[in-house]
Amino acid sequence: DQQVKQNSPSLSVQEGRISILNCDYTNSMFDYFLWYKKYPAEGPTFLISISSIKDKNEDGRFTVFLNKSAKHLSLHIVPSQPGDSAVYFCAASVSGSARQLTFGSGTQLTVLP
Amino acid sequence: KAGVTQTPRYLIKTRGQQVTLSCSPISGHRSVSWYQQTPGQGLQFLFEYFSETQRNKGNFPGRFSGRQFSNSRSEMNVSTLELGDSALYLCASSPGTPGYEQYFGPGTRLTVT
């Protein structure tokens, strides 16, 4: 069963507009969430994270929102740039000694010039 | 700081053979995790090592094994290769202290024929 779900395989956005990528999770034990960006033939690049004690975390153009009651998180990119075109993965972890990330299936973001 | 490095980047093996992949974490990082990425299953956690000890293992057969050396470098071994083992194998490192961000290497693309 998929514990972390990204239901939109792809998203197209015009340059300068907002990109919103969504992620849902089912495991209520998850308490740390991360977003990664991945280009073809490269490893994922860490973007931003959020702990379950917060509902928002911002870093430059990237903001992650967490809605614990809905088990939903989203990544907002404002403004979107063509260089943001990549596959975005959300990942979740249970705090503790082990570093095991459970990933969603990814969303291909295309930012159109 | 130098990023996570993985060698080799590409590998072609025949069914039944074994393979060893290598990962050098970011300097000072003590935790190394391995992931497998395939088109069908996405990114899946293999195992995590911290201070030369395996702390957690994903749902993979015993043909997949690993180890970590005193300098935090890690190796992953797959024995009796199967066609389904063809994948991108990613290594990620993290400091091992609170904070669950993991930083990925570029991966090793393994093709089993």
Image (tube, coloured by chain):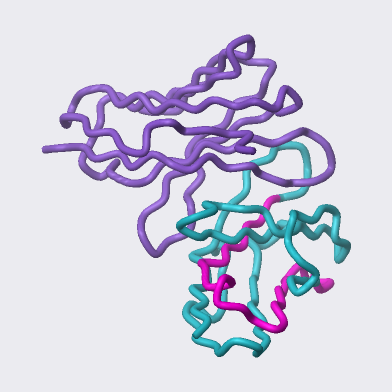
Chain colours: A purple, B cyan
Residue B25 picture location, percent across and down: 65, 64
Relative image position of residue B105 (x, y in whole percent): 54, 62
In the displayed structure, B2 sits above or below A21; it is below
Give, as a single range, the part of the protein colored magenta.
B68-94
Is residue A95 found inside the magenta-colored segment of the image?
no
Foreground pick, A33 / B111: B111
Query: Residue most toward the left?
Result: A113
Q: Nearer the viewer, residue B55 or A45?
A: B55
- B98 vs A35, left or right, is right
Q: Quadrant of residue B76?
A: bottom right
Q: Is residue A56 visible?
A: yes
* Residue located 47% across and 49% down the image: A45
Relative depth, front residue between B17 and B65: B17
Q: How many marks?
A: 0
| B112 left or right, relative to A27 | left
Report the residue that reaches farthest toward the right: B53
Q: Residue at x 72, y 71 (%)?
A: B73
Task: Please say if B4 is above or below B98.
Answer: below
Could one spot residue B1 in this view of the protein? no
Quadrant, the C terminus of chain A: top left
Q: Quadrant of the N terminus of chain A?
A: top right
The vertical placement of A35 against A98, above or below, is: above
Q: Residue at x 53, y 39 (%)?
A: A104
Q: Position of residue B110 (x, y in %)?
A: 52, 76
Residue B55 is situated, as x and y percent measured from the top left of the image, at 85, 54
Q: Is residue B75 magenta?
A: yes
Specify the quadrant of the image occupied by residue B18.
bottom right
Write the residue at 71% across / 28% down.
Answer: A30
